[in-house]
């Protein structure tokens, strides 16, 4: 359920626009759609008030269902502007979808962290959570590409809506979503005072080091800088929707799930930080295959190879970084802390993909990939510190 709105913004909409417009300028505007995810602490304030005053007993279920109802409505409205292509109206509904997608993320991730009390249980829950998240990504990327190839982008939006409505039915029938977060540890009635206390606890009492935020930013540079531009690059090489569906968005998702499995196993033999360092090195080296893709041109064997390798690496990195983040989110105010860390993490992505869009629009693809690899290599070095 979290994957559908997020991947609609990060994958479906970029694919739709790259397929029809093929302009990097639009991608700079798309990067702003991640901004609502940066304001998660503000959304958490609204959720906090609603939980205490209105729907405390069924808070999780009702808040998620309400958010999804708005997302379904906006998906329907946005579908009307894919043909003929109207970027401004698509962008407007994208902002609304991002806002309510952020709201349901706060609730669902807070729920996951609350029920994951032990480290081993946390890893298993996170792997299951991310598997479902990526299956949704497969649905709204490969599924949307296939439907757009044989039908239209409007029809693919309708199918995505149906998928989200099915998830709403499942949530309504699921008794686990009737539980509520515990608020007995709240010492102050004011959310803003509690938020102030949470910042104080994070930065002074627990002393979250400066390097944590450097590591989160470095992860986004390594993972998102080159990956964000791939739809534009691949369409420019002459690939069709159906070819991307089978290669980059089809077989690639199998690689992503396999990567999550490798990450799970790596933590049995190395520390989390060592695993992230190793992932960063391999991911940086792996990006050199896109230089080969640029030099070779359209080649189905090469795109299948690239998709499989890079989705394995993406799956591994995604599991590792969210375990890293989850370690800092367990507190008496789980949703609040998650919203703060997640907001910073999304701000990192917004900055990285905006810069990538600008650079791609002002250079040739070969130079863009070389610079992306250099930025990635520099970011990997941050995982060497601190030594303890």
Image (cartoon, grey):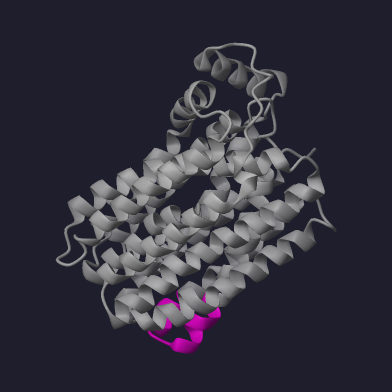
The count of marks equals 0
Q: Quadrant of residue 239?
A: bottom left
In the picture, measured across the screen, residue 384 lies left or right of residue 298, that is right
Of all residues, the one furthest to the right in this rendering is 269
From the viewer's side, name the closer residue of 228 and 249: 249
Q: Is residue 85 visible?
A: yes
Q: Is residue 371 visible?
A: no
Q: At 42% from the left edge and 78% from the top edge, which residue is drawn?
A: 245
From the viewer's side, name the closer residue of 288 and 189: 189
Q: At 48% from the left edge and 29% from the top edge, which residue is drawn?
A: 47
Q: At 71% from the left edge and 42% from the top edge, which residue is drawn?
A: 115
Q: Mostly what secondary structure, the magenta segment?
A: helix
In the rendered structure, which segment of residues is drawn in magenta?
291-307
Query: Does 298 appear in magenta?
Result: yes
Q: Quadrant of the C terminus?
A: top right
In the picture, measured across the screen, residue 84 lies left or right of residue 68, that is left
Q: Position of residue 261 (x, y in %)?
A: 71, 66
In the displayed structure, 103 sits above or below 200; it is below
Q: Position of residue 109 (x, y in %)?
A: 59, 43
Q: Quadrant of residue 142?
A: bottom left
Q: Quadrant of residue 335?
A: top right
Query: Does 116 appear in magenta?
Result: no
In the picture, measured across the screen, residue 255 lies left or right of residue 65, that is right
Q: Position of residue 377 (x, y in %)?
A: 58, 56
Q: Position of residue 273 (x, y in %)?
A: 73, 48
């Amino acid at each position: 359920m979290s994957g559908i709105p997020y991947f609609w913004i990060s994958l479906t909409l970029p694919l739709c626009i790259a397929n029809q417009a093929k302009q990097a300028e639009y991608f700079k505007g798309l990067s702003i759609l991640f901004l609502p995810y940066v304001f998660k602490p503000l959304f958490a304030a609204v959720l906090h008030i609603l939980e205490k005053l209105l729907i405390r007993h069924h808070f999780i279920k009702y808040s998620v269902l309400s958010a999804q109802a708005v997302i379904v409505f906006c998906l329907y409205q946005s579908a009307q502007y894919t043909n003929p292509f109207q970027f401004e109206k698509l962008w407007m509904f994208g902002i609304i979808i991002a806002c309510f997608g952020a709201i349901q993320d706060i609730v669902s991730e807070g729920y996951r962290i609350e029920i994951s009390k032990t480290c081993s249980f946390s890893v298993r829950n996170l792997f299951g959570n991310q598997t479902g998240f990526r299956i949704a990504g497969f649905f709204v990327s490969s599924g949307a590409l296939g439907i757009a190839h044989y039908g239209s982008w409007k029809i693919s939006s309708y199918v995505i809506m149906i998928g989200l409505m099915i998830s709403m039915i499942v949530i309504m029938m699921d008794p686990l979503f009737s539980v509520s977060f515990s608020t007995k540890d709240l010492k102050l009635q004011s959310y803003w005072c509690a938020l102030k206390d949470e910042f104080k606890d994070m930065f002074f009492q627990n002393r979250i080091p400066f390097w944590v935020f450097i590591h989160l930013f470095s992860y986004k540079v390594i993972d998102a800088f080159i990956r964000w531009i791939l739809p534009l690059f691949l369409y420019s090489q002459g690939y069709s929707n159906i070819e991307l569906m089978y290669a980059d968005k089809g077989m690639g998702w199998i690689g992503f799930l396999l990567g999550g499995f490798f990450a799970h196993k790596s933590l049995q033999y190395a520390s989390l930080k060592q695993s992230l360092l190793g992932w960063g090195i391999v991911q940086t080296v792996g990006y050199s295959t896109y230089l080969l893709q640029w030099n070779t041109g359209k080649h189905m064997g090469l795109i299948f190879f690239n998709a499989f390798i890079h989705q394995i690496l993406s799956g591994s990195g995604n599991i590792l970084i969210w375990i890293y983040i989850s370690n800092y989110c367990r507190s008496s105010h789980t949703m609040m802390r998650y919203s703060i860390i997640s907001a910073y993490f999304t701000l990192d992505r917004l900055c990285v993909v905006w810069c990538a869009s600008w650079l791609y629009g002002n250079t040739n693809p070969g130079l863009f990939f070389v610079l992306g690899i250099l930025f990635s290599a520099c970011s990997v070095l941050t995982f060497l510190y601190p030594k303890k």
